[in-house]
Amino acid sequence: MNGGLIIRLIDVVLIILFGFLAISDIQMKRQIRLPGPSPEQTPPREENDAYLFVNIDPENYFRVTLDGETLLETADLKSLRQKLLEVAATEARSLVVVINPEPDAAIQAVIRVFDICEQEGLAKSINMQPEPLSQAPGN
């Protein structure tokens, strides 16, 4: 007799729960469109910036180019770090590292290059829709 009473109580609780769900005002999540930066808030692009491209292919191979000239091709992160620091020290213009992964490149390789720039205090940008390395500048 106690078993039947427990089943009835569970049934009543479930009916009450479904009743609350039916009458509650459940709304779908909505995406809020935020305004973009206004032109007066966007800093002007410096013409004297040097853009150092770090292209990353699917085999985690890094190609470093500056002004269309290939400076380094390596798979070693230590060599990449050294080259970035060397170029930052010798370049007279303000240096911006542009991380340029191919669509099939591992995201971990992108994160590692980003971390190197972050640790060394280098300005950086990520281009997530790059052209293939075979069509990149300097080829």
Image (cartoon, rainbow, N blue to C red):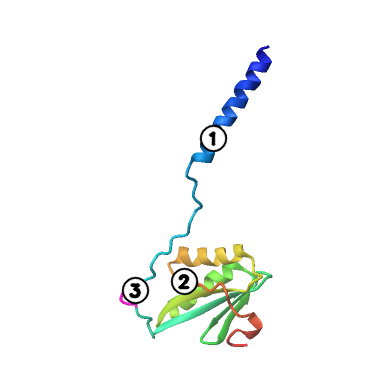
Quarter of the image for residue 79 reads: bottom right
| 5 lies above or below 41 | above
Quarter occupied by the C terminus: bottom right
| 51 lies above or below 104 | below
Quarter occupied by the N terminus: top right
Main SS of residues in magenta: loop
Image location of residue 18, percent across then percent down: 57, 35
Q: Nearer the viewer, residue 22 or 105?
A: 22
Image location of residue 125, percent across then percent down: 48, 72
Mark 2 and mark 3 lie on one chain; the one further toward the N terminus is: 3
In percent of the image, x 51 and y 87: which residue is there?
Answer: 67
In this rendering, the label closer to the viewer, 1 or 3: 1
Residue range of the region highlighted in magenta in the rendering: 38-43
What is the CA distance from the residue labelled 2 to the residue labelled 1? Answer: 54 Å
Badge 2: how crowded within 10 Å, few (<14), some, or many (20+)?
A: some
- Dot label at residue 19: 1
Q: Amino acid at mark 2?
A: Lys
Tag 1 secondary structure: helix
What is the CA distance from the residue labelled 1 to the residue labelled 3? Answer: 48 Å
In percent of the image, x 54 and y 35: which residue is there?
Answer: 19
Q: Nearer the viewer, residue 138 or 23?
A: 23
- Which residue in the protein does label 2 denote? 124
What is the CA distance from the residue labelled 2 to the residue labelled 3? Answer: 22 Å
| 43 lies above or below 69 | above
Q: Amino acid at mark 3?
A: Ser
- Which residue in the protein does label 3 denote? 38
